[in-house]
Image (cartoon, rainbow, N blue to C red):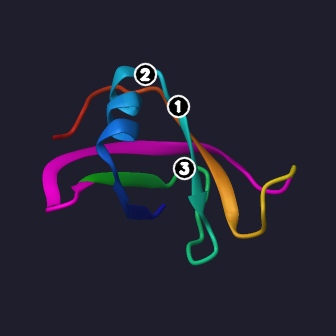
Amino acid sequence: MTEHILKIHQRPLDDLLSGAKTAEVRDCSDRDFQVGDTVRLRELSSSGYTGRCIVRTITHIQVGYGLPEGLCVLSYAPVVSEVS
């Protein structure tokens, strides 16, 4: 299993934290995302990283089905505990 470290902005991070959002469209042209991998999402603002971070486990990866080549949808497992 691999851990992918990715950038995320405040609003989508807040949506993930609230549970309103459980998946994300991501560029997968330069990464080999696999089910079971973890994603460490580090919040980025206009002035740099904020220090907020969450970790999610990939449960499903959708490619194709109308998505442009190089994009995928990563679905995440429900949260057991948060990392800050």
Density class for disc 2 (Cα within 10 Å; few <14, some 14-19, many ≥20) is: few
Q: Which residues are magenta?
A: 44-64
Residue annotated with mark 1: 22
Q: Is residue 1 left or right of residue 34?
A: left
Which residue is at a point 60% across and 70% down the rendered structure image? 32
Density class for disc 3 (Cα within 10 Å; few <14, some 14-19, many ≥20) is: some
Residue annotated with mark 2: 19
Q: Nearer the viewer, residue 9 or 55?
A: 9
Check if mark 3's residue and mark 1's residue have beta carbons within 8 Å. no
Which residue is at a point 45% across and 64% down the rendered structure image? 2
Identify the mark at residue 36; answer none if there is no mark.
3
Tell me: residue 30, above or below residue 21.
Answer: below
Which residue is at a point 50% across and 55% down the rendered structure image? 37
Tell me: residue 76, above or below residue 61.
Answer: above
Q: Of helix, strand and loop, which one carries label 2?
A: loop
Q: Nearer the viewer, residue 20 or 48?
A: 48
Residue at far bottom of view: 30
* Most frequent secondary structure within the magenta stretch: strand
Q: CA distance from mark 2 to mark 3?
A: 19 Å
- Inspect the image, locate mark 1, and give the three-letter code of the amino acid beneath it: Thr
Identify the mark at residue 38; answer none if there is no mark.
none
Which residue is at a point 34% across and 25% down the rendered structure image? 80
Q: Of helix, strand and loop, which one carries label 1?
A: loop
Lower position in the chain sequence, tag 3 or tag 1: 1
Check if mark 2's residue and mark 3's residue have beta carbons within 8 Å. no
Q: CA distance from mark 3 to mark 1?
A: 15 Å
